[in-house]
Image (cartoon, rainbow, N blue to C red):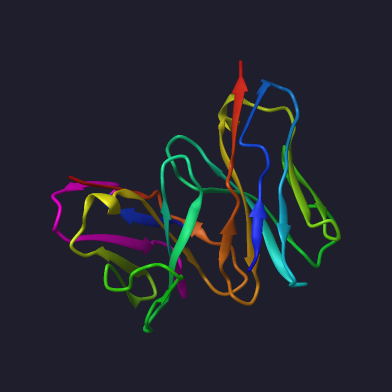
Amino acid sequence: GAVVSQHPSWVICKSGTSVKIECRSLDFQATTMFWYRQFPKQSLMLMATSNEGSKATYEQGVEKDKFLINHASLTLSTLTVTSAHPEDSSFYICSASRQAAQPQHFGDGTRLSIL
Amino acid sequence: AQTVTQSQPEMSVQEAETVTLSCTYDTSESNYYLFWYKQPPSRQMILVIRQEAYKQQNATENRFSVNFQKAAKSFSLKISDSQLGDTAMYFCAFDDQGAQKLVFGQGTRLTINP
């Protein structure tokens, strides 16, 4: 159990377009979902935390208008990178947990390349 | 703010050997969780082991065990009888029980040689 699906796994798009990444908990209800960003050969940096039905909480330095997060149901959260530019190219990973104090389960990540 | 430090950027051992990865952290909290995650070349994050701070007994999962020293704020991972499939990046992570936010260390790239 505790499977998290992330889609797409790899996306290439032109500068200026918006890209949506989906994160789904397949076999459990996730009260909280998390979005991380990972640069090559670096660690994961938390971007934002989202709870179902409420606004996401963004970490310091993360642009809310650039990275739109929606957590409309207990099994789905989306990250939209708006007006993407080459500097937004990165590996984005989501995770989900059933409730507080429970381990986070990670999706397989999305490699985003902006040309 | 909590910080997690992994002082070994890279390690390499022979298959079947035992290897220990180091991790230290800094926090003023008394209740928290510590994790080791494995990230193979596929980049999937895989939970290896979890330790609750209030438990004195070190967590164990098959060939993986930890040495949790709360006073020293140290949380090392020991991999026994290492296998080729253990080759991966290993991240130590801290979870403040109240905030439910994972803070990751810089990672240790572990290579198991045949």
Pick whichever, A57 or A73, lies toward us.
A57
What is the tally of numbered marks visible in this picture?
Answer: 0
Residue at (37% x, 70% y) in the render: A75
Q: Where is residue B47 in the image (x, y as percent from the top left)?
A: 58, 50
Residue at (76% x, 44% y) in the render: B65
Any part of residue B24 in sight: yes
Left or right position of B73 against A56: right
Q: Position of residue A45 (x, y in %)?
A: 48, 57
Please report the bounds of the magenta region as a residue range. Answer: A9-34
| Res B108 quadrant in image | top right
The residue at the far bottom in this view is: A54
Pick whichever, A47 or B39, lies toward us.
A47
The residue at the far top in this view is: B114
Q: Where is residue A28 in the image (x, y as percent from the top left)?
A: 46, 67
Q: Where is residue B22 in the image (x, y as percent from the top left)?
A: 73, 43
Asked if residue B28 is among those painted magenta in the image, a careful observer would answer no
Residue at (42% x, 41% y) in the render: A40
Figure quadrant of the C terminus of chain A: top left
Query: Taking B84 as reference, is A2 above or below it?
Result: below
Residue at (63% x, 65% y) in the render: B95
Query: Taking A23 as reference, is B36 above or below it?
Result: above
Any part of residue A30 in sight: no
Query: Taking B85 as reference, is B107 above or below it?
Result: below
